[in-house]
Amino acid sequence: MTNHLSKYCFAILLFPLFSFAQTKNDTLCIIQINDVYEISPLQNGKAGGMARVASIIKENKKHYQTFAVVAGDFLNPSVMGTASYENEKINGRQMVDLFNHAGINLVTFGNHEFDIPQKVLQQRINESNFTWISSNVFEKDSAGNESAFYKLSSDIKRPFNQTYTLSSKHKQFTVTFFALTLAANQQNFVSYHDYNSSLKPIIAKQNNPKNILIGLTHLLYKEDSLLMAEYPAVKYIIGGHEHQNMKIKAGNGYVTKADANAKSIYKHLIYLNKKGLPQISSQLINLDESITKDSSANALVDKWEQIAYQSFRKMGLEPTNSVCTLKDTLNGLESSIRFEQNNMGALVADAMMYNDSLVDAAIINSGSIRIDDKVAGDISELDIIRIMPFGGKLIDLSVKGNLLLQILNTNDSRKGLGGYLQMSKGFEKINGVWYLKNADVAEDKIYKIRTIEFLASGKETGLSYFKTDNPDITSVISVTNRVDNTPVDIRKQLIAYLKAGSF
């Protein structure tokens, strides 16, 4: 009798302990990064880098159920992506390798994922260990038929879902992600559905108060905010596209974006509040020197750096070579160079005219300058490659003044909107009149303008008329090396200019 009673009492004691363990609130940690183009740290190693991202993920996994997401733009553009390995361009292969190693769980498309060829994009998807979703982007064949993008694994096509639902550890709440991408960098193999038609069916299914709906988006922050205002069921948007960190109140929640190149990450903790409903608490964390690099991820970064260096050397560029010591800090942040004339853009444009007194002016698209960082102090050839990873062949155009004025006025209207052209020194607008080197730009005069082949192809947004077959461009001449008559790449021109101390 006594033995039976003791077993009964022991069971009573066990039951509340077991019950307490089950009712303890779950906490889900979401690590957010976006617009990551470089696996190596920036600012002379002081900020960002995938080895620090890996460290953050690993550390949080010790304390929470942790889920890492990327809000688009990671396969392109990057310095390493332009290098070659195993007889083909790297094109984001290094990023997928680091994402796999660091433990990224979920991604969506940014507009720059579609810069790389369709076949290569499929290769990168197949190589990934993480999940892809998209609610509004679909693959399109030559006949215009749409289907979901897919991952090919063991000869099985696994189509991307439009949403992804994640349960907390003890299933106390769930998180459903949807994903939207802006229709930029359009390619013939990609079809975009509008945001509303993509989101409404997803919203219609949201009838569980213990499920929190989060957008993993690559949109303009104003578009994110409008969506949240229109759809109160969306509680949070984890976004990308803009390269500066932000947390914006919108609708019933917030839009958050981290700094590009993992210079910062957002850490979101989701848990049940006193009402028993999911709640999000967010913290921006700077990935600076206080964050230790994960050693195994850092070794993988080093491996890819050496692969890229070997490729650059074959191009005639030595990444470790010193170029110069800058007296001033050059501003290559996209928040500046895409929206206004700045000192890095002016320096690059001035360098284009180096050693040729017959050139009247130089113009370059700001999208050719991809560093998204400030540069100061000692500059190496690797820094030049980081500034202009795509390079570009220089060409001289004989341009009629009326076309030059059209370009100048178009650019003036784009100030503050993105896509601003960077120009050499000497242009000035006074009382509505454009001047070049203190003389007004005359419609009937011919000007020798130096640029790169891309800008004169008509592919720059809003400048489709600026292409070499425009009748107001009377001649097109490739700029060649005076020694061996080879085409001059803008990166080598910039190196020569800086080494000569002409700035």
Image (tube, rainbow, N blue to C red):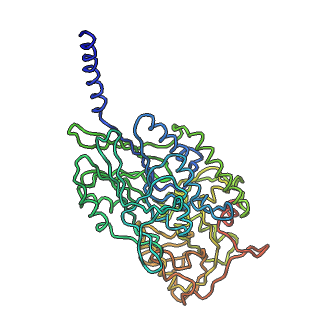
Q: Is residue 194 visible?
A: yes
Which quarter shows the C terminus?
Answer: bottom right
Residue 65 vs residue 349, the one in the foreground: 65
Q: Is residue 88 left or right of residue 234?
A: right
Q: In the rendered image, which quarter is residue 22 located in?
A: top left
Above or below residue 9? Residue 180 is below
Which quarter shows the N terminus?
Answer: top left
Which residue extends farthest left?
Answer: 275
Which residue extends farthest front?
Answer: 1
Q: Is residue 6 left or right of residue 438?
A: left
Residue 474 vs residue 443, the one in the foreground: 474
Percent position of residue 311, x then y? 70, 60
| Residue appearing at x 79%, y 74% in the figure | 484
Which residue extends farthest top?
Answer: 2
Residue 2 vs residue 332, the one in the foreground: 2
Q: Is residue 303 left or right of residue 1?
A: right
Q: Is residue 228 left or right of residue 502?
A: left
Q: Is residue 343 visible?
A: no
Residue 29 vs residue 162, the one in the foreground: 162
Percent position of residue 18, x then y? 30, 27
Percent position of residue 495, x then y? 68, 62
Percent position of residue 129, x then y? 51, 52
